Amino acid sequence: MSSLVLLKDLQTTLDLLRTIERDLTAFPPDLAKADADAKALQTQVDKARATLSATEKPRPQLQAAYDEAKKIEVSTRAHLKESQHQMPYAMALKELGEKERAVSAAAKPLKDLDAVIAARKAELEALEPKLDAAKAAFDSLHAIFLSEHENQVIVRGQLEAKRGELWTAMDADLKPRVERLVSQRQGKLVAEVAQGICGGCHTKLRGPLVTQLRNPAGLIACETCQRYLYLA
Ligand SMILES: [Zn+2]
C-alpha cells in the first residue's frame, strides 16, 4: 500500500470514527443529566481532595516542632531530678516551666490543624458515596443507551481495530507528523487539490508543486497547512 493510499484510508477511518463518536455521545436528556451530575460531583471530590492534601501539608513540620519541644521538656525534667541537690531548685523549676510552656505552644497549632484536617476529611467522606451513587446511576443508564446503539458500538470497535492496523503499517518517520496533523488540523491529514487550490486551507499552491502532484514521486505536503495533497 502506498503511503498516500494508507493516509487516505486512515482519514476515512478517522472521519467515520468521529461521526460514530458523536452519535455515541449524543445522550438523551436523562443520560446527559446523569453524566453532568457525575462530572460535577467528580469535580467537587477532586477539589475536596486537593484542599485536604494542601491542609495536611504543614502538619509534619508542626509535629516535628512539637516532638522537639517535648523532647527538651522530658530531658529538662530528668535533669531536674538528677540535680535536685546541686543547683538552686527554684531556678531549675522555672526552667522546666518554660519548657512546658514551649510544649503547649507547639501543641496548640498542631491541635488546631488536626481539627481542620478532620473537618476536611469529613467533607470528603460525605461526598464520596454521593459520587459513587452518581457514577452508578450514569453507568446503568449508559449501559442501556449503548445496548440501544449496539451496531455503532460494534462498528466503532472495527474502526478502532482498523485505525490500529493502519497505524502499525505506517512508516515510522511519518508518524510524528501525522499525529500532529490529527491533533492540530481538525483531524484532517490529507487534502484534495482542485484548480491548484489546497482543499484543506484554500491556499493557492505554487505552480511547480501542482506539476509535481501530477506525477508524484512520493508524498507532497501543502506548504501552508502541511496536509498531504492529492489531485481531485
Ligand atoms: Zn493547505
Image: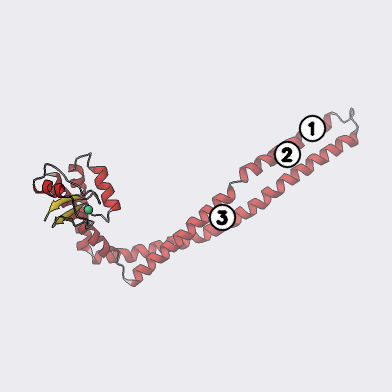
Q: Would you say the beta carbon of the disc 1 residue lies within 8 angstroms of ligand 1?
A: no
Image position, residue 142 (x, y; %): 32, 64
The amino acid type of the residue labelled 1 equals Ala
Residue at mark 3: 121
When the figure is inspected, residue 2 is found, relative to residue 92, above or below; the finding is below
Q: Residue at x 76, y 37 (%)?
A: 73
For marks 3 and 1, give the CA distance. Answer: 39 Å
Q: What number is the disc on residue 78?
A: 1
For marks 3 and 2, give the CA distance. Answer: 28 Å
Image position, residue 46 (x, y; %): 48, 56
Does residue 114 appear anywhere in the picture?
Answer: yes
- Position of 44 compared to 83: left or right? left
The amino acid type of the residue labelled 2 equals Ala
Q: Quadrant of residue 1?
A: top left
Residue at mark 2: 69
> Sequence-wise, which precedes: disc 3 or disc 1?
1
Image position, residue 84 (x, y; %): 87, 31
Of residue 222 and residue 135, the one placed in the foreground of this image is 222
